[in-house]
Amino acid sequence: MANSVYKVIELVGTSTESWEQAARAAVERAGQSLRHLRIAEVTEQDMVIKDGKVEAFRAKVKVSFKYEND
């Protein structure tokens, strides 16, 4: 088995529905431009509040993918 290197980036996904949907949005968007996604870890969750009501859910997600040489 060859040695591998993985890069980790941090993303913030948003959703008006839930933290799960916010995290999913971040990962799915990353998957549109990054290859070989491996792990996603939700590191923080928060909410945007407007006029005393929850307007949006936000999930901070660390995503790792295999680092490849060009």
Image: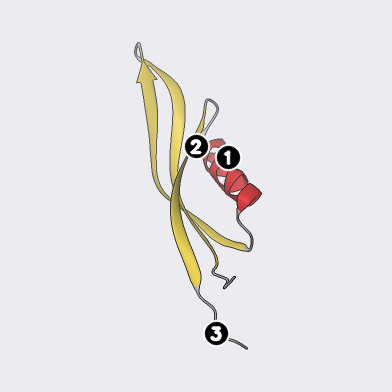
**Quadrant holding the C terminus:** bottom right
Callout 2 amino acid: Trp
Of pointers 3 and 1, the one earlier in the residue sequence: 3
Q: Tell me where residue 51 sits by quadrant.
A: top left
Give coordinates of residue 31: x percent, y percent. Answer: 63, 51
Q: How many neighbours does mark 3 have within 10 angstroms: few (below 14), some (14-19), or many (20 or more)?
A: few
Give coordinates of residue 36: x percent, y percent. Answer: 63, 63
Residue 49, placed above or below residue 67: above
Distance, label 3 to label 1, CA atoms, is 30 Å
Callout 1 amino acid: Ala
Which SS class for mark 1? Answer: helix
Q: How many neighbours does mark 1 have within 10 angstroms: few (below 14), some (14-19), or many (20 or more)?
A: some
Residue 70, placed above or below residue 29: below
Residue displayed at 57% across by 49% down: 30
Residue 11, placed above or below residue 37: above
Which SS class for mark 3? Answer: loop
Per the image, the residue denoted by label 1 is 25
Q: Nearer the viewer, mark 3 or mark 1?
A: 3
Residue displayed at 38% across by 25% down: 48
Q: Which mark is residue 3?
A: 3
Distance, label 3 to label 2, CA atoms, is 35 Å
Q: Nearer the viewer, mark 1 or mark 2?
A: 1
**Mark 3 and mark 1 residues within 8 Å of each other at the beta carbon:** no
Relative to residue 49, is residue 32 drawn left or right?
Answer: right
Q: Nearer the viewer, mark 3 or mark 2?
A: 3
Per the image, the residue denoted by label 2 is 19
Residue 9 or residue 14, whichever sits in front:
9
Q: Tell me where residue 68 sits by quadrant.
A: bottom right
Residue displayed at 48% across by 65% down: 7
Q: Residue furthest front?
A: 70
